[in-house]
Image: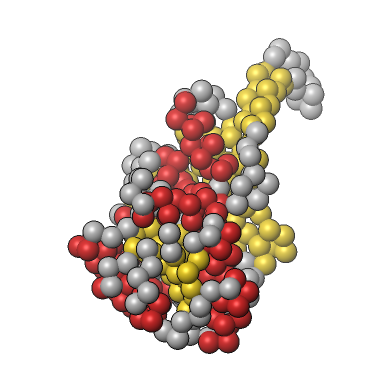
Amino acid sequence: MKIGVIGVGSMGQNHARVLDDLDCLMGVVDINKEMGKKVAKRFGVPCFNNISELLEKEPDGVTIATPASTHLEVSQEVIDSGINLMVEKPLASNLKDAKEIVELAGKKGLILAVGMIERYNPVVSTTKTLLGEGGVGDVISISSRRVSSFPSRVSDMGVIHDLAIHDIDVMRYLLDEKVVKVYAIGGPTNDGNVYEDHANIMIQFANGVTGVLEVNWLTPHKVRSLSITCSNDYVEVDYIAQSLVVTSSRLTEYDVSNLFDIPLEHNIRRFSVKRQEPLKREMIDLIEAIKGEHPPLVDGEDGMESMRVVEAAHRSLREEKEISL
């Protein structure tokens, strides 16, 4: 299996590293020639002068980790060459371009995967299984926190495109439901900022479940967490630690005159999740999809649906109102 990497900035370098570990990296290309040569030298593969030169080598697939604003143009060139592709999130900088990428790949019958890395976190797949088994009861609400300080790698989008899209995708995956309403507040911390650096988003799913997302680049501590309130249990997910804790409680008899000392009996279950690099699982999924073993876990339709919610959140932010989808 031969996979090329288009764009070797921060994320593209990680693509190259993992593909090299899997013995699938066939070359890289980047508009920054010096960066491209540096990465190629590290992994002992060619650095191509341009995308068409890489595509002429007929790779089995490519990953695209260029700025989101270039995803349509780059994807078009790859699709026109009949090459399978994985596009880093977001699929495009806007829903119109995302739709076009999906349609172009569909007409050619190509594999189109979208790089929603948290979907490949083993703690997410464990949570999906847990919810499917039904023991925790029905999901009532789901909330996430994805906060940290400003990342120097991001210069062309705000926190909704860069951060919130991860939890939108995970929530959609866990619930297997469409988002029908979106409301968002937030913005830049000062007038000089082009993009929002903090946002709180409320989304409603078709089955009535409510999702609440908090994202920002203002917190001097990195948090990546998800909590799910169910009719029987409370589920806590830590993406970084890859830990899963399920809690339930029972109230025994108590003295109404002593509300300080209420006797709650807690039942806490900690699930063992084997730590794995999500990006490696994502690349293996791409390779298996190209081989025809199964469709990609995150396909173009997934990428497009998450973009639909992202655009609704931006519109809600601008117009200060709830948006129906």
Residue at x 53%, y 43% (from the top left corner): 124
Residue at the image position 59 percent from the left and 65 percent from the top: 17
Relative to residue 181, is residue 201 drawn left or right?
Answer: right
Q: Position of residue 225 (x, y in %)?
A: 61, 48
Res. 255 in view: yes
Seen from the viewer's position, the closer of residues 236 and 7 is: 7
Q: Give the total number of marks visible in the rendering.
A: 0
Residue ranking furthest to the left: 107
Residue 97 visible (yes or no): no
Residue shown at 20% from the left, 62% from the top: 107
In which quadrant is the N terminus drawn?
Answer: bottom left
Q: Position of residue 156 (x, y in %)?
A: 49, 77
Q: Is residue 31 left or right of residue 150?
A: left
In the image, residue 304 lies at what x, y percent? 34, 59
**Is 160 left, or right, of 42 in this rendering?**
left
| Residue at (44% x, 65% y) in the render | 3
The quadrant where residue 126 appears: top right
